[in-house]
Image (cartoon, rainbow, N blue to C red):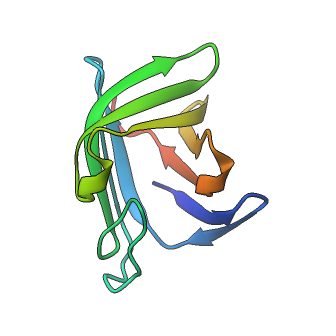
Amino acid sequence: MTSLEAGTPGDLRPILYSGQVVVTRSGAIAVHAANPDDAAPDTPYTRHGYEAYYGSISVEPQSQTFVVTIESSVVGDLVGRRLSRSYQLSGDTLVITPRDAMEGFRATYRRHGT
């Protein structure tokens, strides 16, 4: 992860996070992100400043969207949910945003490896 911005639609602000997203050719995804402040308030996706989940991913390249079906998560309430995301891929840079702007984030990643 090279940057994470969060907030309300039209007012996203940078926050200090590190993380990674791993997508396999077989259709699996794993996401890990950490706030260096482990006392950060919990969110719908985090506990103690940490976000982690994995599941299956269905990608629609034409609409630049994907859906993750969560199989396991540090936040138990997410298990079984389907998260819809938009993405932009340019060279080695991937930008992910929620399809529902009210979720309020933009995560940017740089590709490592193949």
- The answer to whether residue 108 is left or right of residue 113 is right
Give coordinates of residue 105: x percent, y percent.
Answer: 59, 56
Q: Residue at x 55, y 72 (%)?
A: 15
Name the residue rendered at 49%, 73% in the picture.
Answer: 16
Q: Position of residue 9 (x, y in %)?
A: 74, 58
Decide if residue 29 is in sight here. Answer: no
Q: Quadrant of residue 63?
A: top right
Task: Please tell me whether residue 111 is drawn above or below residue 42 in the rendered image.
Answer: above
Which quadrant would the C terminus be assigned to in this image?
top left
Vertical placement of 4 versus 83: above or below? below
How many marks on residues? 0
4 or 57, which lies in front? 57
Q: In this rendering, would 103 be left or right of 114?
A: right
Left or right: 73 as drawn, with respect to 58: left
Farthest residue toward the bottom?
39
Asked if residue 100 is positioned above or below residue 61 in the image, the reply reads: below
Choose top left, top right, bottom left or bottom right for residue 37.
Answer: bottom left
Q: Residue lying farthest top?
A: 62
- Residue plotted at (59% across, 44% down): 97
Residue at screen point 36% across, 78% down? 36
90 up-or-down from 2: above or below: above
- Which quadrant of the rendered structure holds the N terminus? bottom left
x then y, percent, for residue 78: 32, 49
Asked whether 95 or 7 is in front, the reply is: 7
Residue 34: x and y, percent? 34, 67
Q: Residue furthest right?
A: 10
Residue 91 showing in the rendered view: yes
